[in-house]
């Protein structure tokens, strides 16, 4: 579920991004059906999700999954953590997935969300995840 979906800016962001990228339509259905809570960053490039954990799992709050298309028909899913240093733009990449088709498998999306919700636990790595990923994470 997306906790902040009712916010006007988030709803507009979700609508615009999903209309522009068919991969996001399948992803958003899976996120809405997920028991794990997520939030959307309305200011980020593409669609950026982060898990919203309880206080005892606050370390998960740095984990991010960004979905964006550098060109039509080409979608990148990036997994990264933001820096702990205030005002830093540093990010630590956990890898990414490159899609060149508009369809996405439900089981793959479930793997992505499990990986994100776990704070990138090594045992939850998606099968398609590539650690050596030649793309920069956009702001």
Image (cartoon, rainbow, N blue to C red):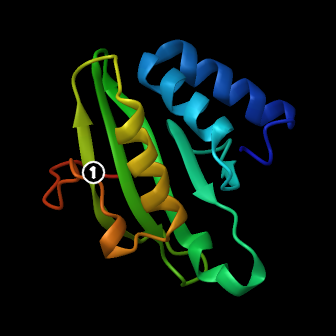
The image quarter in which residue 18 lies = top right
- At label 1, counting other C-alpha atoms closer than 10 Å, the crowd grade (few under 14, some 14-19, many 20 or more) is many
Asked if residue 75 is positioned above or below residue 35 in the image, the reply reads above
* Position of 11 relative to 60 (above/below): above
Element type at mark 1: strand
Q: Position of residue 75 (x, y in %)?
A: 32, 29
Q: In the rendering, at what x and y percent does residue 109 appear?
A: 42, 40
Q: State whether residue 88 appears in this view.
A: yes
Give the side of residue 33 with respect to residue 22, left or right: right
> Which residue is at 35% across, 29% downward?
105
Task: State the residue at coordinates (23%, 37%).
Answer: 98
**Image point (27%, 51%), residue name:** 96
Viewer-closest of 9 and 94: 94
Foreground of the two, 8 or 86? 8
Number of labelled discs?
Answer: 1
Side of 122 where 129 appears, left or right: left
Residue 67 lies left or right of residue 108; in this view the side is right
Q: Quadrant of residue 10?
A: top right
Task: Name the residue rendered at 66%, 56% in the picture.
Answer: 36
Q: Is residue 138 visible?
A: no
When asked about the image quadrant of residue 93, the answer is bottom left
**Residue that label 1 marks:** 96
């Amino acid at each position: 579920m997306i906790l902040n979906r009712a916010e006007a800016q988030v709803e507009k962001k979700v609508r615009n991004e999903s209309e522009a990228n068919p991969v996001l339509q399948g992803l958003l259905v899976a996120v809405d059906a997920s028991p794990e809570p997520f939030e959307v960053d309305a200011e980020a490039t593409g669609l950026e999700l982060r898990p919203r954990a309880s206080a005892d799992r606050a370390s998960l709050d740095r984990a991010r999954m960004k979905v964006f298309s550098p060109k039509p028909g080409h979608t990148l899913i990036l997994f990264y953590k933001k820096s702990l240093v205030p005002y830093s733009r540093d990010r630590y990449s956990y890898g990414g997935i490159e899609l060149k088709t508009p369809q996405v498998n439900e089981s793959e999306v479930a793997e992505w969300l499990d990986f994100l919700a776990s704070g990138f636990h090594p045992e939850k790595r998606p099968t398609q995840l590539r650690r050596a990923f030649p793309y920069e994470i956009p702001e």
